[in-house]
Amino acid sequence: MAKRAKKRATKTSTARRARRAPKTLNDLFLATLKDIYFAENKIIKTLPKMAKAAQSKDLTAAFNKHLKETQGQVKRLDQVFKMLGKPARGKPCEAINGIADEGAEIMKEFKGAPALDAGLLAAAQAVEHYEISRYGTLRTWAEELGMQDAARLLQETLDEEEATDRTLTELATSVINLEAEEQYRAAA
């Protein structure tokens, strides 16, 4: 009798799957939106720790500036969710968790070391590159789905992420990496 019940349950489950509509670009858009929402909120928790760990005042200032921008980016994402009639909710993002873990590892392993700020900056740029990828994709999909208002909000955030990446690159090449190298040579 148990076999018959199991067989019936399997048939029912298979029939339900067959009736489900195939996943659409709209479904993928929403899933990716949830991913970046989680990521941005994780970044809001992580940036103050990175700012505190940074040895360079310039790097601390860059992290604090980006924290304020990130808070505004979350508000834009809230607006996009509202446009979709969906609750603003994130889904765990292993990519951003992994990048955040690497940043935490750098803070721990290089605390007080000349290369700490270079490592923090590299971790921050890994985050920026991830965000640039996500926002570029979301903006494109929003355009393709006819969501022009959402596309505009996503483009605004993409522009900020790209500007932050340029700022971090400039900071790395004009100050942070040079200071780390000078400290290394002085110690050698």
Image (tube, rainbow, N blue to C red):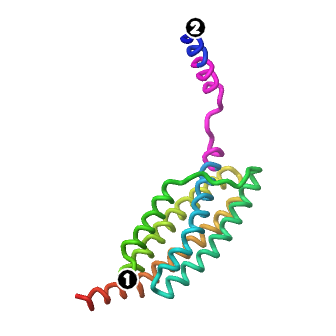
Instruction: In the rendered view, tell whether residue 48 sits above or below residue 180.
Output: above
Q: Of the residues shown, which amino acid type is indicated by label 1?
A: Asn
Instruction: In the rendered view, tell whether residue 184 sits above or below residue 41.
Output: below
First in sequence, mark 1 or 2: give its number: 2
Asked if labels 2 and 1 touch by Cβ distance under 8 angstroms, the answer is no
Residue 32 shows in this picture: yes
Q: Is residue 40 magenta?
A: no
The answer to which image quadrant residue 107 occupies is bottom left
Q: Position of residue 105 (x, y in %)?
A: 41, 67
Q: Is residue 188 left or right of residue 105?
A: left
Q: Give the class, few, some or many, for how many residues have Cα within 10 Å of label 1's Cα (few <14, many ≥20).
A: some
Residue that numbered label 1 is attached to: 177
Instruction: In the rendered view, tell whether residue 96 sits above or below residue 28.
Output: below
Region in magenta: 10-29
Q: Is residue 113 left or right of residue 136?
A: left
The answer to which image quadrant residue 140 occupies is bottom right
Query: Residue at (70%, 59%) from the top-left corner?
Result: 150
Q: Is residue 102 left or right of residue 158?
A: left
